[in-house]
Amino acid sequence: MNENEEAKSYILSILMAMNDIDRRLQMYGFDDIDIYVILSILRSKKREMLMKELGVLGMNNLDAAAYILDKEIGNFFIVVDEDDLELLPFDDDNDVDGDEE
Amino acid sequence: MKVNMDRILLALNNIERYLFENDYFDVEKYVIYMVLALNRRSELAEVLSDDDIEKLDELVVELLAMLDNIQISKKEKKKNMRKVPIVDSMKDDAKKETENKKEEDLIIEEGEYAKKTIEVVSEVLIQKLSEEIDTEKYGELYYIMKRLRYVAVKKFGEDKIKKIEAMIDSKLNSD
């Protein structure tokens, strides 16, 4: 796989995860506001964790990468073919410690 | 605006677990959450007023504080850990923090700033790579690095970045 194909494959895997997460949340009956709140909480928690590891400069770079991705992908929900997505079941374990990482 | 906290907790946990089980790194998780949140925010901005969006962001901050308390109380039982307050929001806090640094007279010469940025990111990537030697992961890290380089070149110019890379190459060869 050449560098360009690797990059495409990598971006596709990110897009598929995004699409999958968005669909799962809708499937479970969350409305737009709920979904925004959930994603904002996840983002903030992850940011807090990464800040210790990457520092302010590293986070700025990561944010820049995210903004570039956001700008470049455009209507990715339409681009990704639903047939490519394999839906894994959500389980009902309500442990929110996040200790697995 | 009201949300069901129990269901939100369940969703938070399931999404984290889903990405963890599918081998996504934390940096990738963060990018995924951020892009999805930006996307969803744009959609909400079309139907909600600025005030409503602001209230929504305040709600997020409140829920984060609640979530922090829930997690801390659980962890205290286990490890007696010190509480770390969360004061994050959807606003561009990275920019604010950078500005605060400037106000604190932490003005770094531009070339030095670029050098530090690349060094910090390289260290983290190398650390992650050494933890898990895997060609697929290497490909992913390589791509992240390429994207970061793209951002750095945009910000500082190709010449400066090449000089820094030459310095890093020289250091690596001497090691």
Image: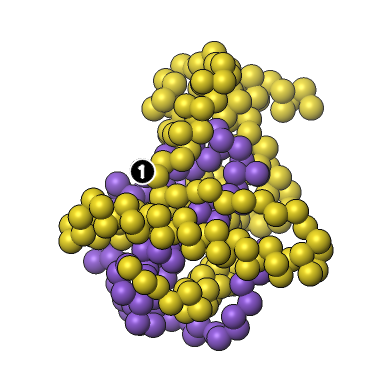
- Left or right: residue B12 versus residue A93 is left
Compare residues B65 and B174 and report the one nearer the observer.
Answer: B65
Q: Which chain is purple?
A: A
**Which residue is located at x 38 percent, y 55 percent?**
B57
**Which residue is located at x 40 percent, y 73 percent?**
B3
Task: Give the quarter of the figure containing the N terminus of chain B.
Answer: bottom left
Compare residues B45 and B60 and report the one nearer the observer.
Answer: B60
Query: Which residue in the rendered view is the most extreme toward the top?
Result: B109
Task: Give the quarter of the figure containing the C terminus of chain B.
Answer: top right
Above or below, comparing residue A35 to residue B43 in the picture: below
Q: Which chain carries label 1?
A: A
Q: Quadrant of residue B165?
A: top right
Compare residues B92 and B71 and report the one nearer the observer.
Answer: B71
**Which residue is located at x 46 percent, y 40 percent?**
B93
Query: Which residue in the rendered view is the most extreme toward the right?
Result: B79
Q: Quadrant of residue B69?
A: bottom right
Question: What is the three-letter code of the residue carrying label 1?
Answer: Ile
Q: Quadrant of residue B75?
A: bottom right
User: Which residue in the protein does label 1 denote?
Assistant: A68
The answer to whether any part of residue B1 appears in the image is yes
On the image, the x and y values in percent for residue B80 come to: 81, 61
Above or below, comparing residue A91 to residue B173 in the picture: below
Q: What element carries label 1?
A: helix
